[in-house]
Image (cartoon, grey):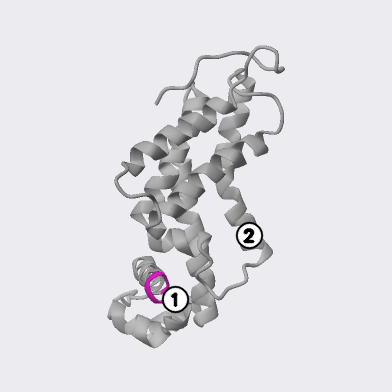
Amino acid sequence: MARLKTHDEALRLRLINRAAATVFDRGAGALSLRRLAADVKTSTTAVYSLFGNKAGLIDSLYQEAVRLFLARLTAVRPSDDPAADVVRLGIAYRDYAVANPHLYGIVFADRLDYEPTPERLNEAGSTIQPLVDAVARGQAAGQFKDGSAEVIALSCWGAAHGLVSLELSGNAPTGLDIGAVYEETLHAVVSGWRARAGDGGHSAPPPRP
C-alpha cells in the first residue's frame, strides 16, 4: 500500500498563508516555526521538510506572494482596447491587495527581515510587465504618447500603489467611496498619457471601463 503523502502543496500553502498573516499582524519577529506548526495543526517536522528552516520559509513566503500577485495580474486578458486594459490591470492590482493584505504587505510593505536575492528581485520586478505590455500595445494602436512604455506604466503603477497603500494603512480620507475614487484616478492617469495631435502620437477617444 502506498504511503500517504502528508507534506503536500496544500499544507505548504496553508503554512505560507498563516506565516504571512502572522507577519502582517505582529511582525517578522513573531514568526516561529514551532508556533506556526501548532497554528496549522501540523508538526515542526513537516515545516522543516517543506522549507528547510526559517530562512527557507521566509524565502518561500516572499516568492509565493509575488507569484500569486503576478497570477492575478496576468489573469487580465488583453483586449482590443489596451488603454482600457491598463485600467483593468489597476483594478486587479487593488482587488488583490484588498483581498490579500497579508501577502501584498510581504511584497510591498517591507514587513520581512529579509534581503531578496537577485533572482527574487527579478521575479518581483516582473509583476509590472503585464502593464508595460498593455501600454506598448496602446502605443502601437495610437492610444498613448510615444516614448518609454516603462515610464507610462510606472506612472500608472505609482498612482495605484499610492492609493492602495493609503487604503490598507487606514489613512485614506473618511467618507469617500475609495473604490470609486481609485477607478476615477486610474482613468485620469490614463487620460493624461493619451496621444494627442501635435505630440507625435495619434488622437483617440478616452478609454471606458
Q: Is residue 199 left or right of residue 63?
A: right
Name the residue that disc number 2 marks.
121
Crowding near the residue tagged with mark 1, few <14, some 14–19, many ≥20 C-alpha atoms within 10 Å: some
Decide: is 138 above or below 182: above
Residue 208 shows in this picture: yes
Residue 77 shows in this picture: no
- Label 1 secondary element: loop
User: What mark, if any, has residue 27 been given in the picture?
Assistant: 1
Identify which residue, 31 or 56, lies in the foreground: 31
How far apart are the alpha carbons under marks 2 and 1? 21 Å
Q: What secondary structure characterizes most of the magenta part? A: helix
Residue in the picture at 47% in, 22% down: 207
Q: Is residue 170 left or right of residue 160?
A: left
Residue in the picture at 49% in, 44% down: 160
Asked whether residue 26 is drawn in magenta, I would say: yes
Q: Quadrant of the C terminus?
A: top left
